[in-house]
Amino acid sequence: MGPLVPVALVLTMACDEPASDPVPATPAEPFSSQLDRDAHSYANPDEVVVRHLDLDWDINFDQRTLSGTAVLLIERVADSAGTLLLDTRGLSISSVEVAGGAGVWLPAPFRLGDEDPILGTPLEVTLPEAVARVRIVYATSPDASGVQWLTPVQTAGKVHPFMFTQSQAIHARSWIPLQDSPGVRVTYRATVRTPAALRAVMSATNDAETLLDGEFTFEMLQPVPSYLIALAVGDLEFRAMTDRTGVYAEPTLVEAAAAEFDDTEAMMVVTERLYGPYRWDRYDLLVLPPSFPFGGMENPRLTFATPTVIAGDKSLVALVAHELAHSWSGNLVTNATWRDFWLNEGFTVYLERRIVEEVFGRARAEMEAALDRDVLTAELARLDGQDQILHVDLVGRDPDDGFTQVPYLKGELFLRLLEQWFGRDRFDSFLRGYFDHFAFRSIVTDDFVVYLNQHLLADGTDLAQVLQIDAWLEQPGLPDNAPHSDSDALARVEAQAARWANGDAEVGRLDTDSWATQEWIYFLKSLPESLTAEQMVELDEVFGFTRAGNAEVVHQWLLIAIRNGYETAYSRLETYLVTIGRRKLIKPLYDELVRTPDGRARAEAIYQMARPGYHPIAASSIDEVLGR
Ligand code: BES
Ligand code: ZN
């Protein structure tokens, strides 16, 4: 920790309303998670733990700040605890006060440590005895890593500004001073003041009927980790889908979004049948402007989603299955540190596939698994051994850079192995029991292993060895018992692509009438690396890839276009990169561009235009590609 920062003692004493009354705190049963320190937080929850937040903010679009107060309800875990350590990044803190249960606010000594480029700045508050609440008055920085401020031009409606937060993995600290570790769960209440006519929504109770009068209140009474606290403000309308599902989106998008996500209720019914009750009451989706850096983010009660998933034919809604699945694998049972991220994502991809299979059929689930198998193979070929490990070591690294496809896809294969070994019925009830057992807790990999040993591996001696559990969790590469991911449909597509590439069939003769999006994507992936100018023209004339509407299909096509210097597609490439900010869709295009000098020049020129519209997370990834 750095030198003492002078603290201006201009603090007022105020008698405040009594503390709100949060849901009973998480019981402190000693999972080993409590022994594994989170390498990405300065907080000291082993001494003092924050249980609840009362938040009050003004949203200022002109200054690009969120400002106001955070009241933290704390509980001493260690008797001797005399300081509270919080995570912050770029916050301007104007005062810190402390109070007893319902008592008077008194200024508290605090100091900010040195800023770490990854972790931000620790805030150390000295706690007198019998303190139950800490009040921090603060404002965010205009370039907070967890907040994106959009001008009207960057929205669908072009009239109103828009802002949204993205806290995962360690960005909550850039807009709230808190214990920013997934091992700490809090309940929260919030009041948000916005410019007139705009609507604020949060990962909490949202009242679709509320007046747009510039003030909104929210409650999240189930304890959630900090990375799931989320806020968005914009010109948002609501459309109900069923009595517990609905969509928030800009007015011009809301109809299309509700139609696209029409199967959400069916997905919920399936997931509840397999894995137990949905414990978050409502499930709504928020469609963000296209600069949203991810496909989806599982903010509780309100998944945040990219508009690029609205293809018009429901072909990309596995993403909804995925984010919904996190309501069990992640939001209910959470990784306690970021090295246990596979517990969130591996389980979620497994659940996602099961949901897709139930709602859209086995062939679709198999196609998605087979596509991902190739993604994993490519990812493993690219990564160092250390990063191929599920229980990955992220010490000293930014989790944003450490996250790869490994926790998702190797994690899913591991669970599928267990499913195949023990049978679906057995494995389904195992998972259901696991979600119940660890509900509303944060756990580490070892907690899972202990539970696995007790429940499934107790079946026979040496099962852990037979199944190579240690190799799956702690070693690089894929163990030789990894399940296969075969898709008959994709095998037929591959054969057709080969026939065309070998000159055995003309494009027009290919049998593509019944192809789903996943088959088109695989077709494009199955084409030879290098194609002639005539072949590119032929493909484009017959199938119209350059002007296709599906963002994933266009993405695959643009990769091929760059690789083969197909200039006809360049203007689409430019529009694509300037309007879309979803990292997964844009980064591979920049990667492909920088492989040649001409491409690099084009990438630089496009990035010049595009960068101001990108989210800080996407911009920092592309900066790296371009060596900025
Ligand atoms: N929770 C993740 C997104 C995330 C991960 C944000 C790590 C920040 C850090 C979300 O559930 C996710 O995995 N989204 C995927 C889509 C999914 C269908 C694989 C994405 O955004 O691409
Ligand atoms: Zn996920």
Image: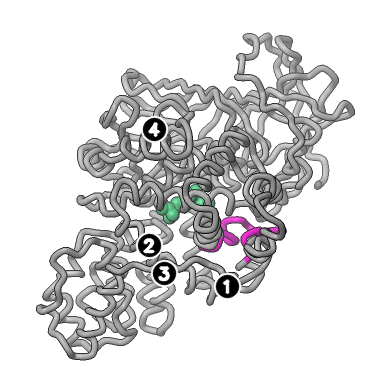
Instruction: Kindly indicate whether the residue at mark 4 contacts the one at mark 2 (C-beta within 8 angstroms).
Output: no
- The residue identified by callout 4 is 283
Label 1 sits on a secondary structure element that is loop
Check disc 3 and give the amino acid type.
Pro
- The residue identified by callout 3 is 588
Disc nearer the start of the sequence (2/1): 1
Label 4 sits on a secondary structure element that is strand
Q: Which of the two discs, 2 and 4, sits closer to the camera?
A: 4
The residue sitting at 57% across, 45% down in the picture is 171
Q: CA distance from mark 2 to mark 1?
A: 31 Å
Label 3 sits on a secondary structure element that is helix
Q: CA distance from mark 1 to mark 4?
A: 39 Å
Instruction: Kindly indicate whether the residue at mark 1 contacts the one at mark 2 (C-beta within 8 angstroms).
Output: no
Q: Which of the two discs, 1 and 3, sits closer to the camera?
A: 1
- The residue identified by callout 2 is 585
Q: Residues within 10 Å of mark 3 (few under 14, many from 20)?
A: some
Q: Is residue 278 above or below residue 157?
A: above
Disc nearer the start of the sequence (1/3): 1
Q: Which of the two discs, 4 and 3, sits closer to the camera?
A: 4
Can residue 263 be seen in this snapshot? yes
Q: How many marks?
A: 4
Q: Which of the two discs, 1 and 4, sits closer to the camera?
A: 1
Q: Which of the two discs, 2 and 1, sits closer to the camera?
A: 1
| Residue segment shown in magenta | 389-406
Residue 480: mark in rendering: 1
Query: Residue 17: where, in percent of width, then height?
Result: 62, 9
